[in-house]
Amino acid sequence: MNNKKLEVYLTRLEKALGPISASEKAEIIIEIKSHILDSLESSDKTIDKILTGLGEPEQVANKYLIDRGLEPQKTPKHPIVKWITIGFLGTTAILSIILIVLIWKFSPVIQIGKNGIHLLGGAISIGKNEYSLDSGIEIGEDGIRLNGITVKDNKDNLTNIISKNLMEDMFFGKVNKTVDITRLKTSKLILDFSNAYLIIKNSENNKIKYSCKYIGRPSIKEGTTFYFDFKNTNAKCRIFIPKHLNIDISAHNARVILKKLENDMKIAINNAKIEFKEVKANIDVDVNNGKISFIPAQNTPYNYDLSVNTGRVASFKSSNDPKAYKVKMSVKNGMISN
Amino acid sequence: MYNVMDSIIKNWSAQIRKGYLDLCILALINAEGKTYGFDIISKLSTLGIEIKEGTLYPLLTKMTKQNLLKAKWDTQNIEGHPRKFYSLTNLGEETLRLMESEYFDMAKKLEAIKAIGGKNE
């Protein structure tokens, strides 16, 4: 037991002597050790008393350091002070984390007002024309763009292609509606999106059903032409449309999924990814910076007219069947895959 | 009242002691010819002069660096652990002589000061 305490003391002393040369350090330590051993032998003092008499190793070391014109080291506070401090800081940290989680879960995280966007109940406010780029988050007039691929469009604007999962946490407005278009005599559907994620499928009846989440102020006009204006909103929509309507899609920063649709379509997209899954219709797609994925339906003839300006195009089996659907796809900067 | 005086005395005492101790240590080492730290502490303690070991050892090392002392490790295994023995160098002896001289001179001057009062009685 004596030896352990002695070793601990001498180790601390060695450490506290820091910058002194190794040989000098060794001499100092041997001399001090020798003194302690002499003390133990010649008196009935306990090792603790002797070490206390010597003083804290740091204090002893400091005297050596000062004599050499070196910086004395700070003496350690009593260990209990250290542990109380750690305990206190730890508790504070845990409480802070709990508080942040509570605020996050229970208060409106994002509010979009006339004056701009307010985050965390007003803790952070961003005005209309301010932009901030922070780990892939861009906040400005157009809404919030998150964590996506930044692409320059033909107007040299930097825009992001949004990734789906993040959008789900950020939405503010919601609309769910089913419209019977028989009375409206709708023949055409125009979808104008910027920063969007669309899934479009056919509905079984003569009704247009849409379910959208968005930030911003979309407008949906119902008439002979059903017009979804989701420009400058960050929208995520699921739209079910009757088979006979013609679709006209214009999207900017979008991801569009068209599943098993039988509607003729004309699509123009900037910075986008568009996926056709077993579509049975005539389509005319124009993509500037983007990717088209076309999965043909089984046992269905298609006649392809494909062009890619800068990029790659997969091989598709074109059919000369007069009943074949005409698929015209053109991509500038991008690829067409299957 | 006493507390104030205590702290004044303590302060003065500490100042005086430092120089006085240096002198005592050199004188003791000179008297012994050759000695080691623990022995210095014991002997001074016997004479009523207390010095903390945490103060002595760094001081001995400093005096060695100042070339007042020379140190030699005793490898002859007395009681199983090595000891560092100190003795005065020539410079150390000279310094001791000058310090003693100065010290006694100061004592004489103090006496002279006290005697001034006496003359006026």
Image: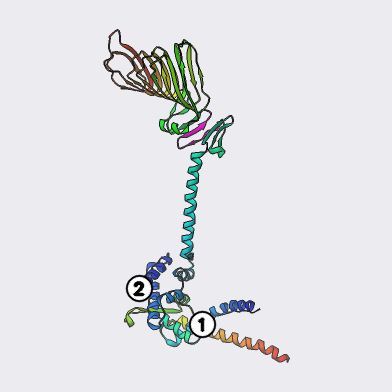
Depth order, front residue of A272/A218: A218
The local secondary structure at tag 1 comes to helix
Q: How many marks?
A: 2
Per the image, the residue denoted by label 1 is: B23
Per the image, the residue denoted by label 2 is: A3
Q: From the viewer's perspective, is A295 left or right of B46? A: left
The local secondary structure at tag 2 comes to helix
In the rendered view, tell whether residue B95 sits above or below residue A325. Answer: below
Identify the disc placed on residue A94.
Answer: none
Can I make out residue B84 in this image? no
Depth order, front residue of A103/A9: A103
Magenta stretch, residue numbers: A128-141
Of the 4 image quadrants, the one containing the N terminus of chain A is bottom left
Work out whether disc 2 and disc 1 sit on a shared chain: no
Amino acid type at circle 2 is Asn
Disc 2: CA contacts within 10 A as few (<14), some (14-19) or many (>=20): few
Task: Provide residue A258's location: percent of width, then percent of height.
Answer: 37, 20
Residue A185 lies in magenta, yes or no? no
Q: From the viewer's perspective, is B15 left or right of A331? A: right
Residue A129 lies in magenta, yes or no? yes
